């Protein structure tokens, strides 16, 4: 099956620093990737849709200057949390759609961000 | 306003019995439905899906039922196994808008 990886799996940073999370589709090309955030015991919240070669589409309430998304190639999308604060601590998950008509998303393993 | 609701935050089932997880949605434009399974600190993994033209899809121990008139879908796991213990998310898709919306999840405990 299609595989999506994320790096790093866990990161701890100081408040005010920026953190980059990578999402890669390992064995397929993904023109569209999604970034989700999951709070404890809550559902996945879609943050943005990342389109290769164009600007990301952000969901309402998500600050695009805070969460920078770059989808520079068909296999890589990056999420940069700029000037991170403790309230940004969360589990960030990316996904990519294998466009075979099934609408199935393949999810990365997630990245746990802890901001001190 | 929640478009997708999983009203049971948790469910406990004895090994070997049937697990039934429910999901309700509000918008009749959704035309594709999926269930994902998630372990702690991992990304969700796809389990089973169904399109709006069907009312049932079966894959091994997993069966998804769709009742379009009631805007309700359910996931049946039979027989349940301890390894099925996880959080299950239902997801609905409006293929015209290419967006997936997830329910809040139901944590399933399968007791040995």
Image (tube, rainbow, N blue to C red):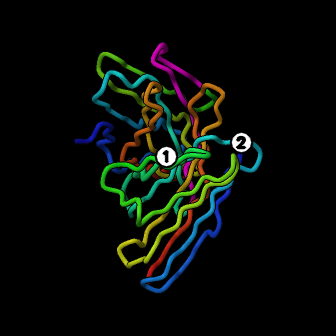
Toward the left, the furthest residue is B1
Subunit bearing disc 1: A
Is B103 within the magenta? Answer: no
Furthest toward the front, the residue is A54
Seen in the picture, residue A11 relative to B77 is either above or below; the reply is: below
Q: Mark 2: give few (<14), some (14-19) or many (20+) Cα within 10 Å.
A: some
Residue A49: mark in rendering = 1
Residue at image mark 2:
A29
**Residue A44: where, in percent of width, then height?**
42, 52
Position of residue A61 relative to residue A2, above or below, is below
Q: Chain of mark 2?
A: A
Q: Which SS class for mark 1?
A: strand
* x 56%, y 76%: residue: A11
Number of dots carrying numbers: 2
Q: In the image, is residue B56 part of the stretch drawn in magenta?
A: yes
Viewer-nearest residue: B76 or A84 = A84
Q: Quadrant of residue A103?
A: top right
Q: Residue at x 30, y 55 (%)?
A: A61
Q: Is residue B112 left or right of residue A47?
A: right
Give how far apart the Cα atoms at labels 2 and 1 are.
15 Å
Question: Which range of residues does the magenta coloring cover?
Answer: B42-58
Q: Residue at x 45, y 38 (%)?
A: B100
Q: Classify mark 1: residues with Cα within 10 Å, few (<14), some (14-19) or many (20+).
A: many
- Image location (x, y in percent) of residue B77: 52, 35
The secondary structure type at the circle numbered 2 is: loop
Q: Earlier in the sequence, mark 2 or mark 1?
A: 2
Name the side, left or right, on which B54 lies relative to B7.
Answer: right
Q: Residue at x 39, y 52 (%)?
A: A43
Residue A98 placement (x, y as % from top left): 65, 36
Q: Could you say which is closer to the camera, residue A32 or residue A98?
A: A32
């Amino acid at each position: 099956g299609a595989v999506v990886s994320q790096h790093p799996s866990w990161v701890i940073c100081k408040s005010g620093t920026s953190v980059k999370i990578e999402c890669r589709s390992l064995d397929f090309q993904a023109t569209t990737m999604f970034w989700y955030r999951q709070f404890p015991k809550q559902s996945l919240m879609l943050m943005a849709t990342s389109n290769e070669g164009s600007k990301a589409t952000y969901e309402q309430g998500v600050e695009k200057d805070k969460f920078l998304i770059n989808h520079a190639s068909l296999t890589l999308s990056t999420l940069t949390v700029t000037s991170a604060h403790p309230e940004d601590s969360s589990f960030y998950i990316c996904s990519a759609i294998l466009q075979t008509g099934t609408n199935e998303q393949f999810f990365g393993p997630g990245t746990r961000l802890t901001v001190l | 306003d929640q478009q997708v609701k999983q009203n049971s935050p948790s469910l406990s089932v004895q090994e070997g019995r049937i697990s039934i997880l429910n999901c309700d949605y509000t918008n009749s434009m959704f035309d594709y439905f999926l269930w994902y399974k998630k372990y702690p600190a991992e990304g969700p993994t796809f389990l089973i899906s169904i399109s709006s033209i069907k009312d049932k899809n079966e894959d091994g121990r997993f069966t998804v039922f769709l009742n379009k008139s009631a805007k309700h879908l359910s996931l049946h796991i039979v027989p349940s196994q301890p390894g099925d213990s996880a959080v299950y998310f239902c997801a609905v898709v409006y293929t015209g808008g290419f967006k997936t919306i997830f329910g809040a999840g139901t944590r399933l405990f399968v007791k040995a």
